[in-house]
Image (cartoon, rainbow, N blue to C red):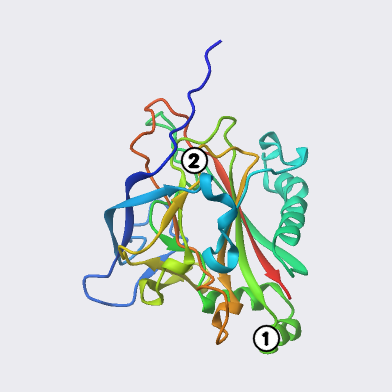
């Protein structure tokens, strides 16, 4: 019986798509909910592919921390409830997977007292058939951060009662936004792995707020695009299994406090095309769950 070759490991140099500003130097924005038939471009800024050294994090797992790097790599998860076969619909995911995510975050984020999951996204590879409709979401190949300080506070106000949100935002309670990322492939992941940069290597001036505009509702949030700098330190987790997890900390309010030990509290990330990927490798299927985490 044939066995699937092990995915490549070790350091790799691959292009990552970094921010390039709008030609007219206007503030950058995304149009988040355009229908496929819309003639409008989805964003007014561009991206520049830059060959980037991406280090395999697997040999150095214990050295990474949320306070320093804003990512955490968990390689001995989870209970049987989160088998990929259960990821068939949003209700099934909420029933079978959300409780696991809540438990995982409470047990791996020191001092966390409460978790509020607000959404999830499944990403699928394009169909090999040219006549098939595209999947709703595919791997994002632009370097970005999902939230900014402004949009994180908006999330608190959106998902909590006004009095409770006001108290959290005014009394110094620590709050974070953390994505829990995993592949759903049966075999170790080979196609479009996730790259992530240590927060300690990312300077504030490289983080560019981008308005995230919802044309149908008028809601405006923020994400962040990332400008390139050669001192950024990029990693990936080679051969990632569907029993492993990456915690991506997109925002940590503690980083805003003077003298904090938190190094930025935000992790830039992007899918990337590993040049060593076999042409016949299975396309990447993945899920990310996004949560507000409160405390201490």
- Identify the image quadrant of the N terminus: top right
Front residue (pair 208, 211): 208
Vertical arrangement, residue 197 with respect to residue 80, above or below: below
Residue 245 placement, left or right of 20: right
Q: Residue at x 37, y 27 (%)?
A: 279
Residue on which disc 2 sits: 238
Q: Residue at x 70, y 83 (%)?
A: 168
Vertical arrangement, residue 118 with respect to residue 287, above or below: below
- Identify the image quadrant of the C terminus: bottom right
Secondary structure of the residue carrying tag 1 is: loop
Mark 2 or mark 1, which has the lower sequence index?
Answer: 1
Q: CA distance from mark 2 to mark 1?
A: 38 Å
Secondary structure of the residue carrying tag 2 is: loop
Residue 235 placement, left or right of 180: left
- Residue 127 drawn at (x, y percent): 44, 33
Nearer to us: label 2 or label 1: 2
Residue 55 placement, left or right of 71: left
- Residue 282 drawn at (x, y percent): 48, 30
Front residue (pair 261, 46): 261
- Residue 197 drawn at (x, y percent): 44, 59
Q: Residue furthest left?
A: 23
Q: Residue furthest bottom?
A: 170
Residue 224 placement, left or right of 256: left
For the residues bearing labels 2 and 1, Cβ distance under 8 angstroms: no
Dot 1, crowdedness within 10 Å: few (<14), some or many (≥20)?
A: few
Q: Quadrant of residue 133?
A: top left
Front residue (pair 53, 135): 53
Vertical arrangement, residue 100 with respect to residue 160, above or below: above
Can residue 218 be spotted in the picture?
A: no
Residue on which disc 1 sits: 172
- Residue 258 drawn at (x, y percent): 55, 87
Q: Residue at x 57, y 77 (%)?
A: 261
């Amino acid at each position: 019986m044939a066995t699937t070759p092990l995915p490549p490991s070790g350091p790799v140099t691959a292009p990552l798509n970094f921010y390039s500003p709008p030609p007219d130097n206007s503030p950058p924005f995304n149009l988040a909910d355009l229908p496929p038939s819309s003639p409008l471009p989805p964003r007014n800024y561009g991206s520049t592919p830059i060959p980037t050294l991406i280090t395999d994090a697997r040999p150095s797992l214990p050295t990474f921390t949320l306070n320093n790097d804003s990512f955490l790599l968990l390689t001995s998860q989870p209970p049987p409830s989160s088998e990929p076969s259960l990821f068939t619909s949003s209700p099934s995911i909420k029933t079978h997977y959300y409780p696991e995510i809540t438990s995982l975050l409470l047990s791996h984020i020191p001092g966390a007292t409460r978790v509020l999951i607000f959404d999830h996204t499944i990403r699928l590879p394009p169909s090999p058939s040219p006549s098939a409709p595209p999947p709703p979401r595919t791997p994002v190949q632009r370097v970005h951060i999902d939230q900014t300080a402004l949009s994180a506070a908006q999330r608190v106000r959106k998902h909590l009662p006004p009095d409770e949100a006001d108290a959290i935002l005014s009394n110094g309670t620590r709050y974070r936004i953390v994505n829990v990322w995993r592949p759903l492939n049966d075999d170790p992941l080979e196609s479009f792995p996730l790259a992530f940069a240590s927060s300690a290597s990312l300077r504030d001036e490289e983080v560019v707020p981008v308005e995230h505009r919802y044309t149908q509702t008028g809601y405006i949030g923020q994400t962040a695009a990332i400008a390139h700098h050669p001192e950024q330190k990029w990693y990936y987790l080679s051969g990632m299994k569907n029993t492993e997890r990456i915690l991506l900390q997109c925002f940590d309010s503690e980083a805003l406090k003077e003298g904090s030990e938190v190094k930025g509290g935000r992790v830039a990330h992007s899918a990337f095309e590993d040049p060593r990927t076999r042409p016949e490798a299975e396309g990447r299927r993945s899920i990310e769950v996004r949560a507000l985490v409160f405390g201490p």
